[in-house]
Image: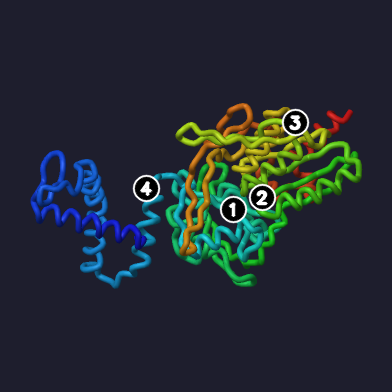
Amino acid sequence: MSKKRVITLMVVIILLTNIITFGATNLMTIKYKDKVILPAKEYEQLKSSYKKYSKAMGLEDYIRDNFLKDVDEEQLMEGQLKGLFQALEDPYSVYMTEDEFKSFTEHTQGIYGGIGVIVTPGDDNLITVVSPIEGTPGERAGLRTGDKIIKVNGEEFTADNMDKAVKLMKGEPKTTVSITILRKDKDGKNNYIDLDIVREEIRLITVKSNIIEDNIGYIKITSFDELTYEDFMKELNSLMKNNISGIILDLRNNPGGLLNVCVDIADELLGEGTIVYTETRHGERAYEKSNKKHIDIPLVVLVNEGSASASEILAGAIKDHNKGILIGNKTFGKGVVQRIRELSDGSGFKLTVSEYFTPNGTNIHGIGIEPDITVDLPEEVQEIGIENLEQDIQLKTAIEKIKDIIR
């Protein structure tokens, strides 16, 4: 509990104690020696505050006096703050300790030590893999979208303490972390798989490009961090100098990231118009718009069930503006926006503050975006992209479609 709140509570208690001691109350005002010292409205507010916090303070005292083991005061306080956010029953609203917040911000900066996997709280309260990051130990170990991480180093975890699990999975390069995943097979049977994964320094190369047959440009974006827009522009400019005939933008297994970075990239592709708008529970809207300047060549976008959040914003804007064709599978369906704040002691929080809508007014939260052309990958295909073009039938379909447009 903050010092400010403690002081406030002390003032409330002192005032109420004095009021009771003097016994000078009536229905309208609190008086002392015939002078009004507290109007009835303020008195009711103070009484309400006292009732609100006295229960928690009483329970704290009882725990300190009676719990079997020594009580860590800091953990007790942190637990209360975490509980405050958990009570919202929103998996994306989270209080983070100083270490947890530092770990979180490291990821958005694009460099950290770990296994390279993006996770989210699942509806089943299990830690759910959104996607492994391309080229990382997690991907090489065979982690897949939809896997449930239930143990880290032998300790069981649920989504309620996902931040601790993530912290354990991160660590110094060349050290090993053991995880147990739950994966359902085609028949819905549960399979438990133990994996020992050696951590590496994860420098997220979030943008890669190539030129494939018929001078078609290929750009793959794996997430949106602070470095992504700069990398995207380098790759895009390089492709444009080669007079490419069209672009395939691969957003498969892209779990999202920073909204402003996604908006910057969308601005290069859309032309003038709305990219996305957000709306709070009070109906307040904020619009992100693009300008007239944009590339004007055929565009095909690849998406799948691992495409989430910011990647859905980009894909949805392209679809609504008819600037490209979406191919693959329905996207993940995360259509809410979090505000991220650091507190003065280094801790911080994420709080869901608004929903986002595609330019046509569609909120895809819990629904996802349907592609224009659905193409299912065979289950045995583990690697996607130009490195496995022969088996990646989604990419092959995209190539054929863009050829048709060019012709």
Q: Do labels 1 and 3 touch, CB within 8 Å?
A: no
Q: Which residue is mark 2?
A: 223
Q: Which residue is mark 1?
A: 118
Q: Is residue 369 left or right of residue 249?
A: left
Indicate which label's residue lies in the foreground, 1 or 3: 3
Q: Which residue is mark 3?
A: 323
- Residue 237 in percent (x, y) is at 84, 47
- Give the amino acid at mark 2: Ser
The disc, 4 or 3, on the residue closer to the chain's N-terminal end is 4
- Residue 361 in percent (x, y) is at 59, 28
In three-dimensional space, the C-alpha distance between marks 4 and 1, rounded to whole angstroms, equals 24 Å
Q: Do labels 3 and 2 touch, CB within 8 Å?
A: no
Q: Which residue is mark 4?
A: 87
The disc, 1 or 3, on the residue closer to the chain's N-terminal end is 1
- Residue 140 in percent (x, y) is at 67, 59
Q: What residue appears at the point 60 percent right and 71 percent down from the top-left corner?
A: 172
The disc, 3 or 2, on the residue closer to the chain's N-terminal end is 2
In three-dimensional space, the C-alpha distance between marks 1 and 3, rounded to whole angstroms, equals 29 Å
Binning the other alpha carbons within 10 Å of mark 3 as few (below 14), some (14 to 19) or many (20 upward) gives: some
Binning the other alpha carbons within 10 Å of mark 1 as few (below 14), some (14 to 19) or many (20 upward) gives: many
Q: Is residue 389 left or right of residue 68?
A: right
In three-dimensional space, the C-alpha distance between marks 2 and 4, rounded to whole angstroms, equals 30 Å
In three-dimensional space, the C-alpha distance between marks 2 and 1, rounded to whole angstroms, equals 10 Å
- Give the amino acid at mark 4: Ala
- Residue 151 in percent (x, y) is at 48, 60
Q: Secondary structure at mark 3?
A: loop
Q: Quadrant of the C terminus?
A: top right
- Determine if residue 367 is in view: no
Q: Secondary structure at mark 4?
A: loop
